Image: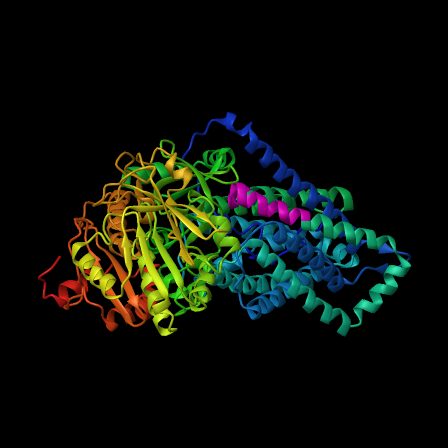
Amino acid sequence: MAAANLELFPPCLVLQDEHDNSHQHEHFRGGLTAGSYKFLRLFNLQSTKLFTCFLGIFVSYLIFGIVQESIVKGTYGKNDKFTFILSLVFFLCVFNAIVSKIILIFRKSHRDSTPSKMYAFSSFTYLFAMLSSNYALEFVSYPMQVLGKSVKPVPVMLLGVLVAKKRYPLEKYFYVLLIVLGVVLFMYKEPKETTKIVQAGEIFGIGEFLLFVSLVFDGLTGGIQDKIRDKHKVQAYHMMFAMNTWSCLWASIGIIATGEFYSLIEFLKTYPYVISNIFLLGITGAVGQNFIFLTIEWFGPLTCSIFTTTRKFFTILCSILIFGNPITFRQMCGTVLVFLGLFLEQLQNETDGESTLHCKKKRVLNRQEMNSVFHIIVRRLSTQQNHYKLVIIGAGCGGLACAAKLAKKLPKDSIAIIDKNDTHIYQPGWTLVGAGLKTAEELEKPQSQFIPQNTTWIQSYANKIEPEKNLVQLDDGSKISYDYLIVAAGIEMNFNKIKGAVDALDNDPQHVISIYTRKYVRNVFNTLNNFRGGQAIFTFPMMPIKCPGAPQKIMYLAEDLFRRNNVRDKTTVIYNTSLPVIFGVKKYAAALMEIIKERNIQLNTRLNLVEVRAKSKEAIFENLDQPGTMKTFKYDILHIGAPMQPFEFLAKSPLADATGFVDVVKETLQHKKFPNVFGIGDCTNIPTSKTAAAIAGSNSILVRNLSNLMFGTNNPVRKYDGYTSCPLVTGYNKCILAEFDFDGNPLETLPINQGKERRLSYILKKDVMPTMYWKMLITGNWNGPAVFRKLFHLGGTK
């Protein structure tokens, strides 16, 4: 049977070849779990999934192989043969492209940013490898063809040693020796057998050469796809669709140019029953490939390798029994040696790097585990969740900054980042979008560009944390286990806390606006720019809130815009804040109060927006000093500062304090109760403003403290001083650059008074800081301006 003959993917495509898991796609990579090995765990939902995947792969490819060999090796009429390999490949690629597209429609995923030319070239080499493999079937037996396609680790290792000067563990040389010995035993033919083979039509040499060519082009395909995965973080079904679509194009050119298509039509007219066989071949192949994806996603690459390697071995046996392919006892021994070598090589790949970061005692234990084949298999097959050295919840500013730093310290696939969003947004720039200084699109980039290499991106939401068990549950019910956890989940906006707010924002964007979400920020500038006078109210909600300066920044910009549009004299600008002061740091509050007075802006403190009545254009505020007392304001424009709250899964977890935020030591960012858990950014209860600048000042502290714990070192590390920054844009071309610490003391970087409105501060906010964010902060290369602050102040500051 020929389940391996017409491979549905190139050998290294996302899954790699079914026998080669050395470069698995990061999105599906899972390590060995540290959980219990009780065998009873097999008899639960996971065991049902496990059995379903095994049965799906085995049955699909069993039928696929039987049908394929009956098509390719069968005799039609008296002497006709099916020689339309390129056409058969074309039809299989069509089936795979259709199936992958259907899956992409129903399974949300991020946009694929891979250049088409990379897919085009990769699919061409893939197609050439597949054709070489299938044409080889005309000259060698099916068992020889399957065996030849299975020994890819041999040329990979040889090229690595001879060309790339690589060095491999001694065990790998032994495993490859087993594979080579098995191939030699299988291919060796006594003189008396040679005649029989020639008479049977199997010409020694040509078939083997075609298999070699197939392996070479498999290697080329894998190299290109490695680059695609590393650079573009492509997901499995995106690559499945793109590769098969391009392969359809190349194959269609070939079958038309060679005239094979027309010959195939005549052949199918003569033997129409082949059409149903081709259709069955495509369906079983596509179904089998999907089960391979599911196996890797649910149980990891080792389990998939065990399934597919076992499946290939049994297809050889079935080929012998069903189609009578001759095989001697010596060749069967060679087959066993090849698959034994492949199996052991997969175990080696799976356990490489697991013990490199533990103490010496731990290394010994891991080495013992690695040498216990049965132990490893039970761990993999009995696990209910994938395991990672480090799990990071959230791929926002804090999560990416820490991941980028730690990815350089840990082996490949030791880190998992849990985040469902496929777009990364520079949220500090939304104020500028509201003022028409930038577009929303300028602040958005594909998340895949910033997920660090060597990490696993799990596109899902976390919905439960069990720190006592070191588990994170995803929104699909699956669980991820960890040794260490960083919570960087951010904060959730909830306009529903204000009665009528969502309805007004959705249905009356000409009067009710907010810069606080991707959806609503796009309406702000048009509304402000088209305003022709009236009462403009800007609100600050109850704390907590990210970037506390944002509600008044958009107010200052709007007030400046009203002046430029000559409608300021017709406008009353009101700022209603739930706080008792305009800003929490006295130095900057004094400067802002001067601006408020100079521009005739009405400031009302301790008023919290509780209701919006869009029909009557009324905003209802509660007096926080007199709870239950309401005050009504008429508005022509109402800008809503979004109420915010911790995510429910965090607030209900043992990690949260009484307010629902992750309870960490403010100087070290380590959790107060669970020492292997750290938190950063908006989701924590650190008493400082929730800004990107705070993450810049704290991410290196977290990484150093976590590294000390993770690697058993005791390196001294400075404590987080609460540094944060709030560039208070007070108009077009003007800004106050507030910088301060935990105690509200100014912690200014520049050797000037940053409490004054300056064009320099505005340029830093508008043009410099976004670039620093994209190029430095979320790539792990920016730890805040402390070094520059000491330099500018000649060491005379913190």
Residue 300 among those drawn in magenta: yes
Residue 626 among those drawn in magenta: no
Residue at the extreme top of the image, as rendered:
40
Q: Is residue 367 visible?
A: no
| For residue 764, above or below residue 797 | below
| For residue 623, above or below residue 207 | above
At 20% from the left and 50% from the top, the residue drawn is 720
Q: Looking at the image, which is closer to me, 716 or 151?
A: 716
Q: How is the image coloured?
A: rainbow
Residue 692: x and y in percent read 31, 56
Q: Is residue 768 left or right of residue 748?
A: right
Q: Is residue 655 visible?
A: yes
At 23% from the left and 54% from the top, the residue drawn is 583
Tell me the magenta residue range. 287-303
At 54% from the left and 47% from the top, the residue drawn is 342
At 59% from the left and 54% from the top, the residue drawn is 237
Residue 330: x and y in percent read 64, 45
Q: Quadrant of the C terminus?
A: bottom left
Q: Looking at the image, which is closer to me, 124 or 677?
A: 677
Residue 266: x and y in percent read 88, 64
Q: Is residue 787 left or right of residue 423?
A: left
Q: Looking at the image, which is closer to me, 322 or 627?
A: 627
Residue 264: x and y in percent read 83, 64
| For residue 218, above or below residue 147 | below
Q: Main secondary structure of the magenta part?
A: helix
- In the rendered picture of this protein, how many numbered marks are placed on residues? 0
Q: Is residue 7 left or right of residue 760?
A: right
